[in-house]
């Protein structure tokens, strides 16, 4: 009883704060409404008994949303994202797509014949998850990690205006890099 | 065997942490008095008087400030410290005895990122906003070494449960064979609480940075939250690296308190004694020096764990 009340409160809160992302007028409020939505969704994951994953969602989403706020404010086309603005374009179309996909997914939950549970959950889910990630799913995780890391480095390289020729000269022979701001390790 | 503490123990966490924070604030006031040559008497009263003053102070705000986010920020910093404290085992018992307690602690700390940025943004002041940005930039420098330090301690105990990490040090404190992780943890503890060498977010060069327009109870939440963060990171540092409540003669509770107070004194001392470091240089030190060192430390611990 208590659990299902909590489920509905968290679910309604997550949906409402997700919707608030498109109702509020400031970049910061939109970002943190989205974070609130993620945290409430993490509450649902905790309710499922998947504590590690739930806390991980809070940890990662907080860092991610804060960094996103910085970038969103930085890249917005109106003056630095500091002015009031809306998070959507083409209101009728985007509203129709959003509500349509929500209805479709929600209908899927009700229509799909879910299988009966067989067996019982493992005693220590955190440990089981770790074993799965480090065992049979190791190759997937390693590939994913490398791909993500390569993407980050690649996008930073593409975005930065200064390359190694700016830092080390045309023949790359300079003994110390020529940086606008000196780093902290004495270079 | 570790067991979860009864629910009423959760009520003891805020006052216990607040008492530690009060001692830290008083110690800081005493150091401040010594530095300026004022008499040391009444150091304990200074933070209490400041608390009372801020509680009754009227809130002020600049035009078009985002009041909602500006109030949410300081509250988040305060609550984050209390949430982090729930997993600290005292006398072998934690209020939340989670099999992923270290991740919980980390997730609670990270809420401070959001809290400070929100405070800076909400004040509608360029100084506040720049302070918020500075904290995020600092976060990019300290968070990974901090996570590696936490992971290294968990690796040594082969468990993410905080009480297990304390129990795993019955033979040898982790600080003895994880000194780099311990140092990284202490430095990041200062950075999390934005004090001393890592106080750029509230720097004097920014007229107070995040704090510039924060007044009244909001300011109290933020300033008290800082000391709560220092206190909780000191307690977790004592549990993860200094053997928690293990020690001869005295009861476990007293040992944990003693170790926490020693670490807290170190952190508060560092706050007064070390200069604020230039942020742009810190970034390179973190990524070129500290992160590889902490990874090497984790590797060393992993090899020891595999070999034993």
Image (cartoon, coloured by chain):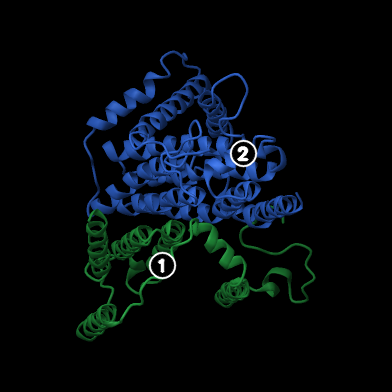
Chain colours: A green, B blue
Q: Is residue B292 visible?
A: yes
Q: Secondary structure at mark 1?
A: helix
**How far apart in space, not on screen, are marks 1 and 2 (Cα)?**
40 Å
Is residue B124 something one can see in this rendering?
no
- Tell me if B180 is positioned left or right of A36 in this view: right
Q: How packed is label 2: few (under 14 Cα within 10 Å), some, or many (20 or more)?
A: many
Provide residue B233's location: percent of width, then percent of height: 50, 39
Q: Nearer the viewer, residue A39 or A109?
A: A109
Image side of residue B284 versus residue B194, left or right = right
A75 on left or right of B123 = right
- The chain containing the residue under callout 1 comes to A
Which of the 4 image quadrants contains residue B94? top left
Evaluate whether label 1 is on the same chain as label 2. no
Percent of width and height locating residue A144:
58, 74
Q: Most extreme residue toward the bottom, as rendered?
A: A93
Looking at the picture, does residue B251 appear above or below residue A19? above
The residue at the point 42 percent across, 36 percent down is: B228
What residue does disc 1 label? A74
Query: Which one is in front, A103 or B195?
Result: A103
**Residue A177, how many percent across, how many down?**
71, 64
Which quadrant is home to the C terminus of chain A? Answer: bottom right
Hey, which residue is sitting farthest left in the picture?
A92
Q: Which residue is mark 2?
A: B241
- Seen from the viewer's position, the closer of residues B48 and B62 is B48
Q: Position of residue A70 (x, y in %)?
A: 42, 63
Q: Nearer the viewer, residue B267 or A171?
A: B267
Q: Quadrant of the N terminus of chain A?
A: bottom left
Disc 2 element = helix
The crowding category of the residue bearing disc 1, from other C-alpha atoms within 10 Å (few below 14, some 14 to 19, many at least 20), is some
Disc 2 is attached to a residue of which chain? B
């Amino acid at each position: 009883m208590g659990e299902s009340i909590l489920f509905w409160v968290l679910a309604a809160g997550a949906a409402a704060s997700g919707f608030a992302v498109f109702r509020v007028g400031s970049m910061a409020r939109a970002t943190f409404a989205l974070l609130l939505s993620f945290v409430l969704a993490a509450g649902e994951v905790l309710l499922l008994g998947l504590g590690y994953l739930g806390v991980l969602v809070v940890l990662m989403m907080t860092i991610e949303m804060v960094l996103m706020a910085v970038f969103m404010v930085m890249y917005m086309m109106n003056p630095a994202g500091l002015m009031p603005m809306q998070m959507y374009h083409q209101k009728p179309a985007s509203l129709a797509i959003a509500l349509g996909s929500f209805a479709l997914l929600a209908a899927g939950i009700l229509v799909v014949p879910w299988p009966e549970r067989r067996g019982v959950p493992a005693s220590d889910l955190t440990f089981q998850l770790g074993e799965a990630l480090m065992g049979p799913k190791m190759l997937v995780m390693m590939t994913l990690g490398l791909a993500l890391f390569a993407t980050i480095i690649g996008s930073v390289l593409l975005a930065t205006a200064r390359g190694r020729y700016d830092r080390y000269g045309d023949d790359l022979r300079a003994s110390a890099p020529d940086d606008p701001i000196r780093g902290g390790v004495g270079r | 065997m570790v067991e979860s503490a009864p629910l009423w123990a959760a009520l003891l966490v805020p006052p216990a942490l607040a008492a530690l924070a009060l001692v830290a604030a008083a110690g800081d006031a005493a150091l401040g008095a010594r530095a300026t040559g004022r008499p040391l008497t009444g150091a304990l009263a200074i933070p209490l008087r400041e608390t009372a003053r801020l509680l009754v102070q009227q809130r002020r705000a600049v035009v078009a400030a985002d009041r909602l986010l500006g109030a949410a920020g300081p509250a988040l910093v305060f609550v984050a410290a209390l949430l982090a404290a729930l997993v600290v085992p005292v006398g072998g018992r934690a209020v939340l005895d989670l099999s992923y307690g270290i991740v919980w602690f980390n997730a609670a700390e990270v809420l401070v990122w959001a809290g400070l940025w929100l405070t800076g943004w909400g004040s509608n002041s360029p100084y506040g906003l720049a302070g918020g940005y500075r904290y995020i930039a600092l976060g990019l420098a300290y968070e990974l070494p901090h996570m590696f330090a936490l992971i290294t301690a968990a690796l040594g105990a082969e468990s993410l449960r905080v009480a297990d990490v304390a129990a795993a040090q019955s033979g040898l404190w982790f600080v003895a064979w994880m000194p780099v992780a311990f140092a990284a943890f202490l430095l990041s503890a200062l950075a999390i609480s934005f004090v001393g060498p890592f106080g750029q977010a509230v720097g004097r060069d920014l007229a107070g940075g995040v704090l510039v327009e924060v007044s009244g109870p909001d300011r109290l939440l933020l300033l008290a939250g800082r000391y709560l963060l220092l206190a909780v990171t000191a307690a977790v540092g004592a549990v993860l690296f200094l053997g928690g409540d293990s020690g001869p003669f005295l009861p476990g509770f007293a040992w944990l308190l003693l170790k926490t107070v020693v670490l807290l004194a170190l952190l508060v001392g560092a706050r007064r004694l070390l200069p604020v470091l230039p942020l742009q240089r810190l970034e390179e030190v973190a990524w070129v020096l500290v992160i590889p060192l902490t990874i090497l430390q984790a590797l060393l611990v992993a090899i020891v764990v595999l070999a034993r």
